[in-house]
Amino acid sequence: MTLQQLAYFVAVADVRSFTRAADLVGVAQPTLSRQLRALEDELGAPLVDRGGRNGPVLTPAGEAVLPLARRMLADADSARTAVAEIVGLRGGRVRVGATPSLCIGVLADVLRVFHAQHPGISLELVEDGSPPLVRTLSRGELDIALVIVPPGGVDPALHITPLLRERLSVASPATQPPPSGRGSLTVRELARRQLVVPRQGYDLREVVQRAFADADVAPRYAVQGGEMDAVLRLVEAGTGVAVVPDLVFVGRPRLRRTVLTPALYRTVALARRADLKPTHAVRAFQETLLSFLAELSAGSGLPGDVQVLHRPDH
C-alpha cells in the first residue's frame, strides 16, 4: 500500500469518475486504474464497484477505508509541511527555461502539478531555443532548463540529465488527405511539399535544414519564421507541412502525424550549472518532472515515438 494509491482512491471517491479523478491527480487514467487495482489486491477486497450506472460507487469496504485514507493522507501532508518549513520549500523561486515545443508538449502540465504541490514557490518561465537557453543558464539567469542535446554535446560546465528521446515527424492538417499513402515520407518527398519552419535560433530548424542538405535537395518554404505554436496553427490551417517533435501532437487532433524516413531523433535533457548546488526548490522541481514523465510512460501517455531515458530515484 502506498500513499499515492490512497490518493488515487480518494480522488475516485470524491469525483465518482475515473477520467476526472485521473485529471485531478495529474496521471493517465490507465495508471490510476492499475494502481487502484493493486491497492484492492493488497487489501484483499474491491473498494470500488465499477459497474454503477452513474459512475464508480464505493463498496462497503471502500466506505470503511475512505475516512482512514483521508486521515493517512492528511498526516502525510502534515509531515511534508513540517519538513518543507525546515528545508525551505515553503518559499523560494525556480527559474525554468524550455524550448517552445516542450512548453507545448509537456512542461505546462509539469508546472501545473508542481505549483499544486508547492504553491509557496515562485515559478518563472523562459521560452527560447536551446542555444540561447544554454547561454542564459550559464550566466546564472536560469536555475534549470529543458534543452535539446546537440550532436557535439553541451557545455561541460553544465550538469546534464537526459530525459527523453523523441522522433521528429511530419505534421500535416488532419482535414486533408495524408501526405503519403504508406504512412511515411522521405526527405526527398518532403522537399516537394510546401514547408512551414520556425524562426532562426530553433535547433529544430537547423536539424531539418541539415537533413535536406544531406539528401542534396532544397526545401520549398511556404512560411519561414514564428514560434512553434504559430507553426502548428499554420499547418492546421493548411498552409503547409512541418517537421516537428512527436510530443507536440498531444492534444492536437487537427494535426496528422506521418513518420519521416530515414528517422530523425533528438534527445531532450535537463540542464543546470555544474558548479552550483541546486536549491531544495530546484531539486523538488526536478523530482516532479521525472515523476510526471514516468507516470506518462507507464500509462502509455506519450505520443508517437517518445522514450523516457531517466526515471525518478524513488
Image: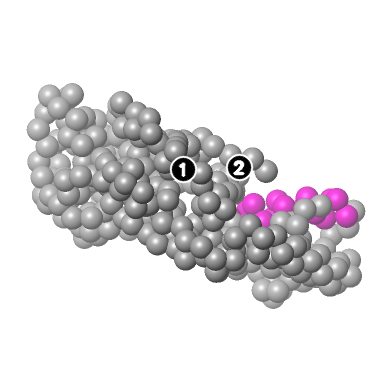
Report the side of 113 relative to 97 (left or right). Answer: right
Residue 58 in the image: above or below residue 285: below
- Pointer 1 residue: 276
Disc 2 is placed on an element classified as loop
Residue appearing at x 77%, y 53% in the figure: 2
Q: Do labels 1 and 2 touch, CB within 8 Å?
A: no
Vertical placement of residue 122 versus 293, above or below = below
Q: Position of residue 3 (x, y in %)?
A: 75, 57
Q: Quadrant of residue 39?
A: bottom right
Taking the magenta stretch, the answer to whether it contains residue 307 is: no
Q: Is residue 35 magenta?
A: yes
**Disc number placed over residue 112 in the picture, else none:** none
Q: Residue at x 84, y 51 (%)?
A: 41
Q: Position of residue 312 (x, y in %)?
A: 61, 42
The quadrant holding residue 204 is: top left
Residue nearer the viewer, 263 or 67: 67
Instruction: Pick the quarter of the image with the C terminus.
Output: top right
Check disc 1 and give the amino acid type. Answer: Leu
Crowding around mark 1 (Cα neighbors within 10 Å: few <14, some 14 to 19, many 20+) is few
User: Magenta segment, which residues?
Assistant: 28-43
Query: How many neighbours does mark 2 have within 10 angstroms: few (below 14), some (14-19), or many (20 or more)?
Result: few
Kindly tell me whether residue 289 is visible in this rendering: no
Q: Earlier in the sequence, mark 1 or mark 2?
A: 1
**What is the count of numbered marks?**
2
Q: Amino acid at mark 2?
A: Pro
Which mark is in front, 1 or 2?
1
Q: Which mark is residue 312?
A: 2
Left or right: 136 in relation to 238: right
Q: Is residue 201 left or right of residue 145?
A: left
